[in-house]
């Protein structure tokens, strides 16, 4: 029941804001909206499953304790650990299901959902360059550490010129606008440095304009890192490692500005090159084990509440869910500081919940 409730709430909240305006304007049929809901459901399952596991565990043991069933079980010689073992085993099974959803099914369905949504309203007319990495038509990949109202910071553009040559453009700032009439994305870069390899040819320019076309050809335009499956993230990480031809010494020697400042700015851009991918990989893995941590902490908390009212258990579950995601969000906010290894912080909520849950369960089993 809790799974159905969370799925319904998350599904309506995440989709109606995008789909309802399209229905009102006549850009989407009810058949397309139904398909969009089906594609979005696995993405919602990834969040609803751990939340439902925590809530149902607290509610079950809250009622179990409130009705004095735990006292009767102990009087019959049955320990709390024996009662909790099947639920913990179930949580491990659900961890495997969560892993399949988080690392493969949900990202693929999310990409299909975004494609269907873009078909409804026109991809280029609503193009928004996300922070991080975006693959563009013409064998180009663009990285922007920040995007504030189409004003970009720490920009890197990689393009394949031919079979043996590639070009990397690095700029501290820039901006872009979309030419809907000609189906073009026009990118302006300030203080850009271009590096062509092989040959280590570099040159510096105050202003640079890039015109990216072929948006109408159906090429992949706006697939975020968060929408990649785990194998795709692994391939992307290897590809990014291969796309690091920029020599800082070569670029800084040719830049028409203070070499020390230029080198520091470029070093910051290049240090961010891999961290968002590592962050997403660890996030998908870590969130797959949330069901076990939630079950482990939910059992003793439900017993300690010792009430029959449902609302208390739901409130506790929502508070714990908020704590879990708050810790994750703090870790994600450090993605631009790879020196702190923020991708490892994705595991902190699991470790905290499992450690606290194990201590509380041990104390509850001893009647403390």
Image (spheres, helix red, strand yellow):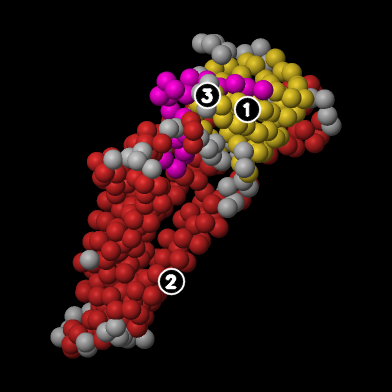
Q: Compared with residue 312, is residue 358 higher up or lower down, i.e. above or below?
A: above
The part of the image, by quadrant, that contains residue 35 is: top left
Does 223 appear in magenta? yes
Q: What element carries label 1?
A: strand
The part of the image, by quadrant, that contains residue 267 is: top right
Q: Which label belongs to residue 319?
A: 2
Evaluate whether residue 336 shows in this view.
yes
In this figure, which residue is indicated by the disc labeled 3?
A: 181
Residue sitting at the far right: 258
* Alpha-carbon span between mark 1 and mark 3: 16 Å
Q: Nearer the viewer, mark 1 or mark 3?
A: 3
Residue sitting at the far front: 25
Q: Compared with residue 96, is residue 200 higher up or lower down, i.e. above or below?
A: above
Does 328 appear in magenta? no
* Alpha-carbon span between mark 2 and mark 3: 49 Å
Instruction: Give the class, few, some or many, for how many residues have Cα within 10 Å of label 3's Cα (few <14, many ≥20).
Output: few
**Residues drawn in magenta:** 209-227
Instruction: Give the class, few, some or many, for how many residues have Cα within 10 Å of label 2's Cα (few <14, many ≥20).
Output: few
Q: Is mark 3 on a helix, strand or loop?
A: loop
Q: Are marks 1 and 3 in contact (CB under 8 Å)?
A: no
Q: Nearer the viewer, mark 2 or mark 3?
A: 3
The mark nearer the N terminus, 2 or 1, is: 1
Picture residue at 37% right of the left edge, 71% below the top = 317
Instruction: Give the class, few, some or many, for how many residues have Cα within 10 Å of label 1's Cα (few <14, many ≥20).
Output: some
Locate the C terminus and report the quarter of the image it occupies.
Answer: bottom left
Horizontal and vertical percent position of residue 349: 46, 61
Horizontal and vertical percent position of residue 268: 68, 39
The mark nearer the N terminus, 2 or 3, is: 3
In this figure, which residue is indicated by the disc labeled 1?
A: 187
The mark nearer the N terminus, 1 or 3, is: 3
Picture residue at 28% right of the left edge, 64% below the top = 5
Horizontal and vertical percent position of residue 107: 36, 41
């Amino acid at each position: 029941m809790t799974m159905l409730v969370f799925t319904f709430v998350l599904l309506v909240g995440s989709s109606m804001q995008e789909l309802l305006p399209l229905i009102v304007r006549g850009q989407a049929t009810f058949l397309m909206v139904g398909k969009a809901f089906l594609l979005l459901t696995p993405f919602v399952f990834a969040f609803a499953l751990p939340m439902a596991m925590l809530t149902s565990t607290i509610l079950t043991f809250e009622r179990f304790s409130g009705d004095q069933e735990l006292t009767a079980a102990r009087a019959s010689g049955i320990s709390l650990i024996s009662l909790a073992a099947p639920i913990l085993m179930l949580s491990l099974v659900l961890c495997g299901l969560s892993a399949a959803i988080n690392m493969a099914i949900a990202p693929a369905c999310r990409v299909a959902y975004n494609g269907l949504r873009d078909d409804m309203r026109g991809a280029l007319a609503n193009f928004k360059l996300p922070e991080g990495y975006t693959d563009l038509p013409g064998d180009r990949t663009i990285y922007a550490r920040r995007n504030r109202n189409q004003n970009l910071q720490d920009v890197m553009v990689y393009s394949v010129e031919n079979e043996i040559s590639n070009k990397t453009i690095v700029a501290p700032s820039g901006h872009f606008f979309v030419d809907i009439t000609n189906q073009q994305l026009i990118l302006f870069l300030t203080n850009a440095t271009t590096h062509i390899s092989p040959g280590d040819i570099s040159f510096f320019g105050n202003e640079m304009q890039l015109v990216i076309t072929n948006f109408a050809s159906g090429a992949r335009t706006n697939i975020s890192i968060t929408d990649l499956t785990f194998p795709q993230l692994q391939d992307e990480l290897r590809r990014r490692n291969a796309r690091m031809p920029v020599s800082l010494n070569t670029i800084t020697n040719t830049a028409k500005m203070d070499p020390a400042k230029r080198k520091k700015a470029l070093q910051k851009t290049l240090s961010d090159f891999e961290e968002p991918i590592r962050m997403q990989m660890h996030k998908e893995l870590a969130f797959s084990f949330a069901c076990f941590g939630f079950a482990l902490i939910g059992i003793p908390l439900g017993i300690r509440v010792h009430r029959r009212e449902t609302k208390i258990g739901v409130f506790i579950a929502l508070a714990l869910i908020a704590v879990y995601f708050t810790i994750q969000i703090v870790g994600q906010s450090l993605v631009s500081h790879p020196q702190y290894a923020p991708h490892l912080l994705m595991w902190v909520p699991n470790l905290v919940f499992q450690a606290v849950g194990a201590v509380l369960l041990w104390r509850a089993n001893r009647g403390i």
